Amino acid sequence: MTKSETSKATSNDIIKVAGLKSSGKTEFLLKPDSAANKNLAADLKILGVSKLRFAGYIRPMGKSDWVLHGKLGASVQQTCVITLESVTSRLNADVSRLFTSDMPDFGNEEEREMVEDENIEPLTDVINLADVMAEALALNLPAYPKKDGAEIEKTDFAASDVEPLTDETIKPFAGLAALRDKLNK
């Protein structure tokens, strides 16, 4: 990539589409400070975000669309779903978005049909890199963070005169297997 093919975005998180070059790539790098990471963690309702880095480029696609390709990296602290202790996970994800001027207009309808490709965004006057980064981080968070070695202990709950349900008794064919074994004897 030659110097004439690439322009560097400033530290500003918002890129004006009118300022993008019609040929070549516009590179970007976002490394939020600790205060921004703290606010992002609060927004995502997690314990913490650190080492957050979002780097990539935006290039033209066709006459009026723009494509963003980037790499997201972060360390996140979440609550373990079993022990409720802090769990740190390292995230590395590829991020792609197509900003298109040809998005269908759904009007003010309350029910809207979803666009098949979740990576397609409507093109506006600006591309907010911080929003793309935050959305990518949210989408890549572990759904059920678990501390190494943490396991759910077996617990049985029932009234004193009732046999507790177990995984084995809940299975629909557990009784049939016992009947089969009884008949085979």
Image: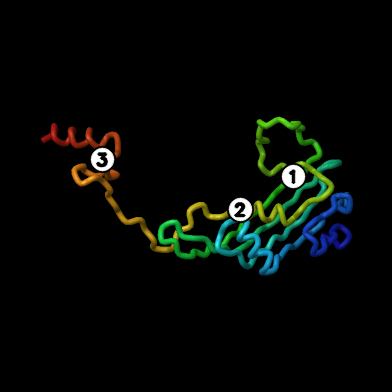
Classify mark 2: residues with Cα within 10 Å, few (<14), some (14-19) or many (20+): some
- Residue drawn at (49%, 60%), measured in percent from left and top? 79
For mark 2, give the secondary structure. helix
The local crowd at label 3, few if under 14, some if 14 to 19, many if 20 or more residues have their Cα within 10 Å, is few
Q: Earlier in the sequence, mark 3 or mark 1?
A: 1
Please name the residue that numbered disc 3 is placed on: 169
Cβ atoms under marks 3 and 2 closer than 8 Å: no
Under mark 1, the amino acid is: Leu
Q: Residue furthest front?
A: 160
- Name the quadrant of the C terminus: top left
Quarter of the image where the N terminus is located = bottom right
Left or right: 92 as drawn, with respect to 164: right
Q: Which disc number belongs to residue 98?
A: 1
Q: Position of residue 33 (x, y in %)?
A: 70, 68
Q: Amino acid at mark 2?
A: Ala
Q: Of circles 2 and 1, which is in front?
A: 2
Amino acid type, mark 3: Thr
How many numbered callouts?
3
Q: Viewer-proximal residue, 123 or 165? A: 165
Task: Answer with the quarter of the image where residue 40 lies.
Answer: bottom right
Q: CA distance from mark 2 to mark 1?
A: 19 Å
Q: Is residue 150 above or below residue 182?
A: below
**Disc nearer the start of the sequence (3/2):** 2
Q: Are marks 3 and 1 in contact (CB under 8 Å)?
A: no
Q: Residue 138: which disc?
A: 2
- Tell me if label 2 and label 1 are in contact, CB under 8 Å: no
In percent of width and height, residue 89 lies at: 53, 62
**Circle 1 crowding by C-alpha within 10 Å: few under 14, some 14–19, many from 20:** many
Query: Does label 2 or label 1 sit earlier along the sequence?
Result: 1
